Amino acid sequence: MSPRPAQPPEQAEAKKFAIIQATLDAIVAKGPAAVRLGDVAKAVGMSIGTVQYYFESRDDLLAQSFSFHTATVLLHLEEMAKPGGDPRGRMARYRLHDAFAAVHGVGMHEQRSRIWLELVTAARTDEGLQNCVDAVFAGWRRLFRTIVDDGLKRHDFELFQLSAAEVVDTFVAIIDGFDLATVASHGPDPRTMTRILIETADRLLEG
């Protein structure tokens, strides 16, 4: 492929971002198996050659799009793990409640849920995508484990029957179930989702 004229880095990044966003939209709408370079190029108003300039192949485009989405989700989770500046935010129990309330907004829940399902499915035969799946699970666990460990240290709450790791895995499993239900159009509304998570935490972690 012949080299293209040099362009400012920010312009190149903007084009790559647009292509990835269009790819993620296509994954949500039709699944990764139906994503075509021509459709993505048309969606962003570029030629197929331009898309191929930034991504070597369709598989490369899908892999980088999944990786970008994963990185975005992990960034959200890292921000959620930081203590808030107000007195209520500094208490681990309320930090946990606030994190649950924010779950729906991580990567836009419906889109995130659909991409997550496709990512988990595709990862069965792709080691690179499996690394993305592992990273997302690790991110959710790290978020909740950070808050739970801080709460135990500060005596905001105590463990009841499960270990800290088991409590965290319970939270992650519930969220994972909500994601699957959302894809099947049977998921609870955000307020109900938050309430279920908070009530589960309050029963597993004695205050």
Image: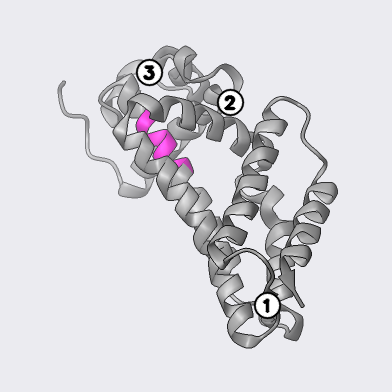
Q: Which residue is mark 2?
A: 28
Quarter where residue 95 is shown = bottom right
Residue at point 28%, 21% (across, down): 57
Q: Upstream in the sequence, badge 2 or badge 1? A: 2
Q: Nearer the viewer, residue 149 or 193?
A: 149
The region drawn magenta spans 62-69
Q: How far apart are the alpha carbons under marks 2 and 1?
A: 41 Å
Residue at point 37%, 35% (across, down): 129
- Crowd band around label 2 with a 10 angstrom C-alpha radius: few (<14), some (14–19), many (20+): many
Quarter where residue 169 is shown = bottom right
Q: Which residue is mark 3?
A: 47
> Which amino acid does the dot numbered 3 rest on?
Ser
Quarter where residue 110 is shown = top right
Q: Is residue 90 left or right of residue 165?
A: right
Query: Residue 78 appears at what percent x and percent y?
Result: 52, 63
Disc marking residue 149: none
Q: Which residue is mark 1?
A: 158
Q: Mostly what secondary structure, the magenta segment?
A: helix
| Residue 67 on the magenta span | yes
- Crowd band around label 1 with a 10 angstrom C-alpha radius: few (<14), some (14–19), many (20+): some
On screen, residue 205 above or below 1: below
Q: Upstream in the sequence, badge 2 or badge 3? A: 2
